[in-house]
Image (cartoon, rainbow, N blue to C red):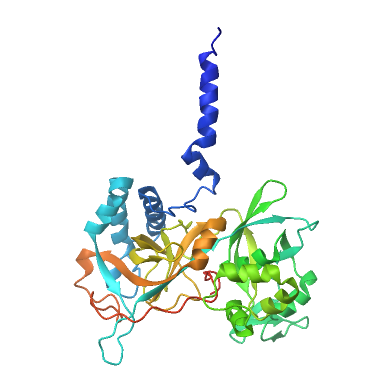
């Protein structure tokens, strides 16, 4: 009886390992932390910290991260980064807990001077869509570039007219869609509903029909206020609270004849541009699924670690981990809002669409800075009465692209 040569066994083993190795599977999924447990690893924490550190390293050492000195300087964080990165992946979390101090942010005190409010945490993600550079077959939904006639005049977005004058406001979503052939199309998408959610998210990846992929980033918006279509559907009686992204998506897909009217109830429109790499967050770094957080930079400077304590609404499990303030969002305003970045693709989208929970956020500041000043007027004691949970979101994931 003959036996396979050792080299054949090696080839078989290599093929099996390539097919079934978990690391290989993770590599296949956009090389990110987009799938369960969504960044809950030491490696993901290290990657997010490294991204912030690279940005700190590019700044002058004397640069203040925030108007409040307690947050420190770029030089101070450069030193923290050198120490932290040298600790390695397994020891980074413990180092940050020892080197930094958690300071809780709460809302502005109530009338009694004693009330503290919980933070509301929503979620967002980057869609992965199907598309083509050429219009054909099912690829009929255009994603368009920023037009040359979109300018700022009279202090806000307006349209430059052929005679050189400018009028406000720029056309609405419905008006743009009506004249879409006059705009430059970057890519044609397969699913119009997914295209709308790309507008909500502000950036995404498109898997093209030729086997390649392209990245889309936020270029501009038409300047009209964002009106959540979840609210429109609820007012129509089409959906009942809680309204989630999945419910909105299902309704739009099931009611194509009414979908355009509903979509046009949101006058805001986003223009995109193709990026060589995945569009970064507001800090200018690649976001890490489960470890990057969108914040209001007026209260939390971008780049610093924050401790987030809330609930993963999708499955009810606790969310209690170190994250990094690396993005912003138009819906993320004040010290009582945070937007958790879940990553790419459909699974991340399902988590992000359902995420809506109360919790607490703690900024992590260098211990030696605590005597300088308070973190913010809104910073409150650790233990204060909490308000009742907020109602569920009507819009699903919140955009971080619409300034």
Q: Is residue 220 above or below residue 304?
A: below
Where does the image place residue 172, in percent across and percent down from the top left? 69, 81
Q: Is residue 175 above or below residue 1?
A: below
Q: Residue at x 44, y 66 (%)?
A: 313
Q: Is residue 284 visible?
A: no
Q: Residue at x 61, y 87 (%)?
A: 154
In the rendered image, the residue lying farthest to the bottom is 111
Q: Is residue 212 above or below residue 315?
A: above
Where does the image place residue 80, in percent across and percent down from the top left? 28, 56
Q: Is residue 166 above or below residue 58?
A: below
Where does the image place residue 307, in percent across and percent down from the top left? 32, 64
Q: Residue at x 54, y 13 (%)?
A: 5
In the rendered image, the residue lying farthest to the top is 1
Where does the image place residue 267, in percent across and percent down from the top left? 65, 80
Q: Nearer the viewer, residue 322 or 155?
A: 322
Question: Which image quarter is the N terminus in?
Answer: top right
Q: Is residue 76 left or right of residue 38?
A: left
Q: Residue at x 50, y 57 (%)?
A: 343
Q: Quadrant of residue 197?
A: bottom right
Q: Is residue 348 left or right of residue 389?
A: right
Q: Nearer the viewer, residue 9 or 267?
A: 9
Q: Is residue 98 visible?
A: yes
Count of numbered circles in the view:
0
């Amino acid at each position: 009886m003959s036996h396979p040569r050792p080299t054949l066994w090696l080839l078989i083993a290599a093929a099996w390992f390539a097919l079934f190795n978990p690391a290989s599977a993770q590599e296949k999924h956009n090389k990110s932390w987009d799938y369960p447990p969504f960044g809950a690893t030491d490696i993901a924490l290290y990657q997010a910290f490294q991204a912030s550190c690279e940005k700190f390293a590019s700044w002058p050492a004397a640069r203040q991260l925030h108007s409040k000195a307690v947050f420190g300087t770029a030089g101070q964080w450069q030193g923290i980064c050198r120490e932290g990165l040298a600790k390695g992946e397994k020891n980074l979390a413990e180092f940050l807990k020892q080197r930094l101090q958690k300071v809780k942010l709460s809302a502005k005190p109530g009338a009694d001077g004693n009330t503290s409010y919980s933070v509301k945490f929503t979620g967002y993600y980057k869609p992965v869509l199907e598309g083509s550079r050429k219009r054909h077959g099912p690829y009929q939904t255009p994603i368009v570039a920023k037009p040359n006639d979109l300018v700022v005049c009279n202090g806000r977005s307006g349209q430059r007219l052929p005679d050189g004058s400018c009028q406000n406001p720029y056309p609405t979503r419905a008006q743009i869609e009506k004249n879409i052939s006059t705009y430059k199309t970057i890519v044609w998408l397969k699913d119009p509903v997914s295209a709308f959610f790309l507008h909500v998210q502000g950036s995404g990846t498109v898997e093209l029909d030729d086997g390649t992929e392209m990245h889309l980033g936020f270029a501009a918006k038409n300047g009209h206020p964002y009106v959540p279509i979840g609210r429109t559907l609820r007012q129509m009686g089409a959906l009942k609270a809680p309204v989630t992204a999945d419910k909105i998506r299902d309704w739009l897909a099931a009611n194509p004849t009414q979908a355009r009217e509903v979509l046009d109830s949101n006058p805001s429109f986003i223009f995109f541009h193709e990026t060589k790499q995945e569009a970064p967050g507001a800090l200018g770094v690649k976001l890490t699924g489960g470890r990057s957080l969108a914040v209001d930079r007026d209260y939390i400077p971008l780049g610093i670690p924050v401790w987030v304590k809330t609930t993963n609404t999708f499955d009810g499990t606790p969310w209690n981990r170190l994250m990094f303030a690396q993005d912003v969002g138009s819906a993320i305003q004040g010290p009582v809002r945070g937007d958790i970045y879940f990553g790419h693709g459909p699974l991340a989208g399902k988590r992000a669409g359902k995420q809506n929970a109360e919790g607490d956020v703690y900024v992590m500041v260098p211990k030696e800075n605590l005597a300088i000043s308070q973190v913010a007027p809104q910073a409150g004691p650790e233990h204060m009465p909490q308000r009742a949970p907020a109602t569920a979101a009507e819009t699903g994931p919140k955009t971080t692209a619409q300034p």
